Image (cartoon, helix red, strand yellow):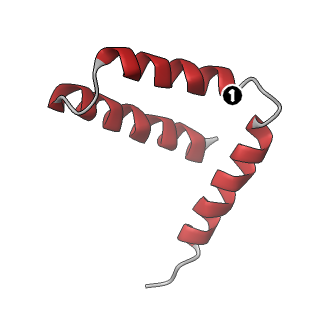
Amino acid sequence: MAISLSVVLLLAIILVVMLRGGNIKAGPAIIAVLFGFFLASTGMAPSIDRFLNSIADSISSIKF
């Protein structure tokens, strides 16, 4: 839960920066948000969640 909340926050910050910087307009940003919202309610959502969790686990296991 904590990982997905921080990913959502990070993506929201990136979206706001892109909107303010003029890299993306409001229309495509709304479409992207709606796409993500509806994708989360499909049968594909658990697979995407497992994939992102495995990436997060791999990154957190890197020793510096």
Report the residue at 61% width, 70% height from top. 58
Q: Is residue 62 above or below residue 5?
A: below
Left or right relative to 35: residue 17: left
Task: Identify which amino acid the numbered label 1 is placed on.
Answer: Ala
Q: Which of these two is toward me, 28 or 7?
A: 28
Write the residue at 42% across / 38% down. Answer: 11
* x 33%, y 35%: residue: 13
Relative vertical location of residue 6 with respect to residue 15 in this rendering, above or below: below
Q: In which image quadrant can residue 16 be found?
A: top left
Can you say which quadrant of the picture contains the N terminus? top right
The residue beneath circle 1 is: 40
* Quadrant where the image shows the C terminus: bottom left
In the figure, is residue 55 to the left or right of 17? right
Q: Quadrant of residue 43?
A: top right
**Residue 30 picture quarter:** top left
Residue 24 locus on image (x, y percent): 28, 28
